[in-house]
Image (cartoon, rainbow, N blue to C red):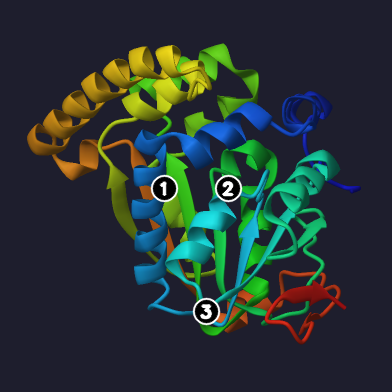
């Protein structure tokens, strides 16, 4: 894929390419097998489905990575045909191996999507914008361009000013764009392409932070020890959810209803989406 880093400092794109180039097998295993994470993923997929109004015909996951998010979206919306793109050919290849031909997957640029205008009813940008911090508006404009009239764009980001968010930005250079992921900035961005509303998903990131560091062990004795830690994190998160106002929560979703006039002028266009006769999408 070309053009990923256009319009940014060379080091910004280089950091992202280096960090995300390879398939993260450990992360994929954790997100698909860790029961403490799968419960969260199913809850988020259900919220996305509700935001989309139930059962969209065609959906797109921009920055699909190893495909775990797509698997939960398909579970929540089984009648939807799903496509996913990622700039990493290694991640796309791994997703094809793990998930078979259930999704139409392509190595592509989020700033120049290979789809025609009005191709999808639902477009998801999850944990993506802070990795393309030099042109968030361009990513969202492309997402809006390929969304059909009446369709929905969902943007999910963690609050960049929370303590754990700042810790991750300090530890992981590829996460430093998260400092700009705050509700006001995301809503301003949404206003450039349509009408957006803010929803809160999770009060605390402690369980997810724990999963980042210890994952979900394959050995039974290690899983037993990990389970104790995860259960303690769950207790903490439930307490935070009860005691903290939602505007102090960590994980947020902006639901955008694109304005066709605003989004029609922003995209480059590309290949059309078509069915393959078996309920799947393909790039045609």
Of callouts 2 and 3, which one flags the residue occurring earlier in the amino acid sequence?
2
Of callouts 2 and 1, which one flags the residue occurring earlier in the amino acid sequence?
1
Quick one: SS at disc 2? helix
Work out which quarter of the rendered image holds the C terminus and state it.
bottom right
Quick one: SS at disc 3? loop
Q: Is residue 80 above or below residue 46?
A: below
Q: Nearer the viewer, residue 62 or 161?
A: 62
The residue under the point 47% across, 71% down is 77
The residue under the point 68% across, 44% down is 65
Confirm or deny contact between disc 2 and disc 3 (CB under 8 A): no
Confirm or deny contact between disc 2 and disc 1 (CB under 8 A): yes
Of callouts 3 and 1, which one flags the residue occurring earlier in the amino acid sequence?
1
Q: Is residue 89 above or below residue 36?
A: below
Mark 2 and mark 1: span between their CA atoms? Answer: 9 Å
- Whole-percent x, y for residue 112 in the image: 80, 60
Q: Which residue in the protein does label 2 denote?
A: 68
Q: Which residue in the protein does label 1 denote?
A: 41
Q: Which of 94 and 63 is in front in this view?
A: 94
- Whole-percent x, y for residue 195 in the image: 42, 71
């Amino acid at each position: 894929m070309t053009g990923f880093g256009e319009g940014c400092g060379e080091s910004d794109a280089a950091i992202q390419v280096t960090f995300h180039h390879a398939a993260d097998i450990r992360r994929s295993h954790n997100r698909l097998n860790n029961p403490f994470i799968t419960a969260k993923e199913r809850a988020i997929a259900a919220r996305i489905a509700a935001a989309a109004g139930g059962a969209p015909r065609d959906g797109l996951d921009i920055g699909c990575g190893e495909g775990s998010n797509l698997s939960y979206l398909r579970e929540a919306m089984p009648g939807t045909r799903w496509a996913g793109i990622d700039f990493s050919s290694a991640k796309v290849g791994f997703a094809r191996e793990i998930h078979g031909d259930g999704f139409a997957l392509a190595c592509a640029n989020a700033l120049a999507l290979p789809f025609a205008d009005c191709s999808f009813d639902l477009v998801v940008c999850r944990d993506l914008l802070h990795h393309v911090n030099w042109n968030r508006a361009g990513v969202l404009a492309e997402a809006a361009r390929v969304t059909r009239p009446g369709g929905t764009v969902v943007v999910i980001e963690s609050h960049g000013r929370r303590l754990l968010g700042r810790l991750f930005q300090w530890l992981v250079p590829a996460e430093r764009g998260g400092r700009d992921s705050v509700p006001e900035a995301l809503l301003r961005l949404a206003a450039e392409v349509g009408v957006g509303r803010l929803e809160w998903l999770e009060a605390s990131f402690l369980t997810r932070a724990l999963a980042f560091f210890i994952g979900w062990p394959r050995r039974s004795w290690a899983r037993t020890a990990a389970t104790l830690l995860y259960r303690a994190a769950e207790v903490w998160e439930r307490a935070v959810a009860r005691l903290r106002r939602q505007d102090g929560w960590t994980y947020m979703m902006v639901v955008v209803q694109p304005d066709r006039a605003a989004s029609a002028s922003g995209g480059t266009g590309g290949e059309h989406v078509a069915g393959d006769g078996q309920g799947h999408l393909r790039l045609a």
